[in-house]
Image: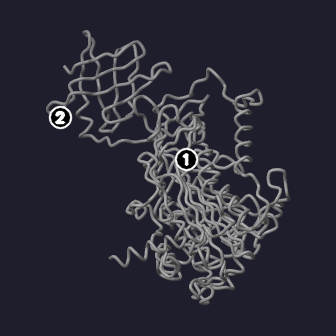
């Protein structure tokens, strides 16, 4: 045990001494601590590699912000979409073994994979999945709000997702296509994507702390919690985001010490400790332009970016005249940047436990200037200037209220009419239900609960309420309910992406379990102030009726919750609830109407 501890101390000391001797990184700790403070970031870790060595690795801030437990170079973070390079590289190894061709149709290996039209089914090749050239736009709404562990179920949804351009005409980011790569490898190897990524990379690179599931992440003691910075500057702890079946697109958790080994492999033509991990022929192709992302030219905000292309799971661009290979990653509570300069043989990984943070890219650029011996840009000052300008716009007269909200409108239906299940085969299912006299929405993601806040007419704001304070509620999206020719709620329309028309989710009204045995508990006569209310069924049906008086028609009761019903009089919704069971019969009928609540007792 003493030898193991001494070996560990020696390894850590070597990293520190190397960094101290590298004049390019002189004073970097102070600069990064200052950045941590200015950006109000819980924590981040960084590793810098050059050639086949780690020249710097350190943590800043806290992995557990509440308990002030610090980050170190072994702290686990979710790396998000920087996972993609691992997934495509699995196919690179399979191609080297002559088990697949990138010019094959993915349907050769996944026959059940279908696209929106015949042109896509006939022309899309595996290479299109790897470089985002299928013509499919981002469809993250489909898995983000409707997650499932069943990868095949997620791929089934692709058939119903419409393209916005032709195959290989434009670059459009799409996570489903990296899921498809993971499944394709599963079909060839007979192993899960998680097993493939571990066997192909984690084990041979000795990435002992890296894993691909939230369950494993939680089992490690030195793992960061994720956080989000609120508009008022406060830091809020977030639940881990489990992307479930979408794992091949972004589920890896790792440390900067482990990711340094991954970078060394890419910088050294696919070799680590002189052993080939990634085939060199694949590596060179993966970091070469496969698709133009945009016709990027230098701008005021990005004067040093001269092009922007995509390889296989990598963004390709220039930085101050140096060829840069990079990819970012975002999951709830975490942001990552993994970058390297193949010609300069320099790599930088920055992992942060703050969602949608600027810190990883800022740290990457600060380190890049030093390691590449380029003129230093004051990235911190540039960041603070951008933030200052944003606050001025928000607080000043430059902000224009563009809300389309129409005041003093009401929904066309009573709340109970919106209740039920809603389904779209390309996205998933959600339910709308009533709780505490309010409408709520629940998708397959049980960690999030949504309140439907009336916006205007039949449009509601979908507000995330679970584990959130009242002053931090956020509108995730809007939902518009539509009716059929009979006036019943028939579908819910949701704009899932700016490039797409609103998606229709078909409505199936909620039906609770009512049978003749259950109905007998309600049937009978109830007396209130000398008046008799009659509750009955007809012809052994499972429909319940209420008769109040001779001058009014009978009312059909609609079941809204257990032992709760509703009906309408002159457009107004009235509620009926049965209470107090005795000898399998309800003894009380509680009638709620606009002028009050009345209790009738069984005769």
Does residue 232 appear to the left or right of 593 in the view shown? right
Q: Which residue is mark 1?
A: 506
Q: Which residue is mark 2?
A: 584
Does residue 317 appear to the left or right of 150 in the view shown? right
* 521 over 348 or under it: above or below: above
In which quadrant will I find the C terminus? top left
Q: Image point 55% across, 47% down: which residue?
A: 506
Image coordinates of residue 73 in percent, x first then y, are: 51, 64
Q: Nearer the viewer, residue 119 or 474?
A: 474
* 527 over 357 or under it: above or below: above
Does residue 457 appear to the left or right of 422 in the view shown? right
* 367 over 190 or under it: above or below: above
In which quadrant will I find the N terminus? bottom left
Q: Image point 44% across, 48% down: which residue?
A: 68
Image coordinates of residue 533 in percent, x first then y, are: 29, 19
Other residues around mark 2 within 10 Å, as few (<14) / some (14–19) / many (≥20): few
């Amino acid at each position: 045990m003493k030898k193991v501890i001494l070996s560990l101390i020696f390894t850590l000391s070597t990293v520190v001494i190397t960094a101290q001797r590298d004049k390019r990184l002189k004073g970097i700790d102070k600069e990064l601590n200052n950045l941590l403070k200015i950006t109000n970031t819980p924590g981040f870790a960084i590793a810098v590699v050059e050639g086949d060595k780690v020249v710097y690795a350190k943590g800043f801030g806290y992995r557990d912000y509440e308990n002030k437990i610090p980050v170190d170079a072994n702290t686990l973070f979710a790396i998000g979409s920087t996972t993609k390079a691992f997934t495509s590289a699995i196919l690179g190894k399979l191609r080297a073994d002559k088990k697949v061709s990138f010019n094959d149709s993915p349907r050769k290996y996944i026959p059940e994979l279908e696209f929106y039209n015949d042109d896509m089914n006939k022309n899309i090749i595996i290479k299109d999945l790897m470089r985002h050239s299928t013509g499919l736009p981002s469809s993250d709404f489909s898995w983000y709000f409707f997650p499932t562990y069943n990868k095949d179920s997620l791929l089934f949804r692709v058939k119903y997702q419409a393209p916005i351009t032709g195959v290989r005409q434009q670059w459009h980011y799409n996570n489903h296509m990296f899921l498809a790569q993971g499944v394709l490898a599963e079909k060839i190897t007979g192993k899960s994507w998680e097993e493939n990524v571990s066997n192909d990379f984690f084990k041979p690179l000795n990435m002992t702390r890296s894993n691909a599931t939230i369950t494993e992440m939680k089992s490690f003691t030195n793992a960061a919690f994720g956080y989000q910075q609120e508009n008022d500057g406060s830091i809020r702890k977030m639940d881990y985001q489990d992307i479930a079946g979408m794992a091949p697109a972004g589920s890896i958790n790792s440390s900067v010490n482990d990711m340094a080994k991954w970078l060394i492999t890419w910088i050294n033509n696919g070799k680590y400790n002189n052993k080939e991990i990634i085939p060199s022929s694949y590596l060179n192709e993966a970091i070469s332009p496969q698709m133009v992302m945009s016709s990027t030219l230098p701008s005021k905000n990005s004067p040093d970016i001269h092009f922007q292309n995509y390889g296989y799971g990598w963004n390709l661009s220039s930085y101050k005249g140096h060829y840069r290979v990079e990819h970012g990653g975002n999951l709830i509570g975490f942001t990552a940047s993994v970058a390297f300069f193949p010609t300069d043989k320099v790599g930088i990984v920055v992992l942060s436990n703050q969602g949608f943070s600027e810190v990883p890219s800022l740290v990457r650029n600060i380190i890049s200037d030093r390691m590449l011996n380029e003129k230093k840009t004051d990235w911190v000052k540039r960041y603070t200037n951008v933030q200052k300008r944003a606050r001025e716009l928000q607080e000043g007269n430059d902000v224009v209220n563009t809300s389309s909200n129409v005041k003093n409108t009401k929904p066309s239906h009573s709340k109970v009419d919106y209740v039920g299940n809603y389904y779209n085969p390309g996205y998933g299912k959600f339910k709308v239900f009533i709780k505490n006299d309010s409408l709520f929405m629940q998708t397959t993601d049980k960690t999030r609960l949504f309140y439907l806040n009336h916006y205007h007419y039949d449009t509601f704001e979908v507000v995330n309420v679970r584990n959130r304070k009242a002053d931090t509620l956020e509108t995730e999206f809007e939902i518009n309910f539509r009716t059929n020719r009979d006036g019943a709620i028939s579908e819910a329309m949701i704009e899932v992406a700016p490039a797409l028309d609103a998606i229709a989710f078909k409505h199936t009204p909620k039906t609770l379990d009512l049978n003749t045995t259950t109905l007998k508990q309600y049937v009978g006569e109830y007396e209130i102030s000398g008046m008799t209310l009659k509750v009955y069924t007809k012809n052994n049906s499972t429909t319940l009726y209420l008769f109040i008086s001779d001058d009014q028609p009978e009312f059909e009761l609609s079941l809204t919750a257990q032992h709760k019903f509703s009906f309408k009089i002159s457009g107004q919704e009235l509620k009926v609830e049965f209470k107090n069971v005795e000898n399998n019969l309800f003894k009380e009928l509680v009638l709620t109407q606009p002028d009050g609540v009345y209790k009738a007792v069984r005769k």
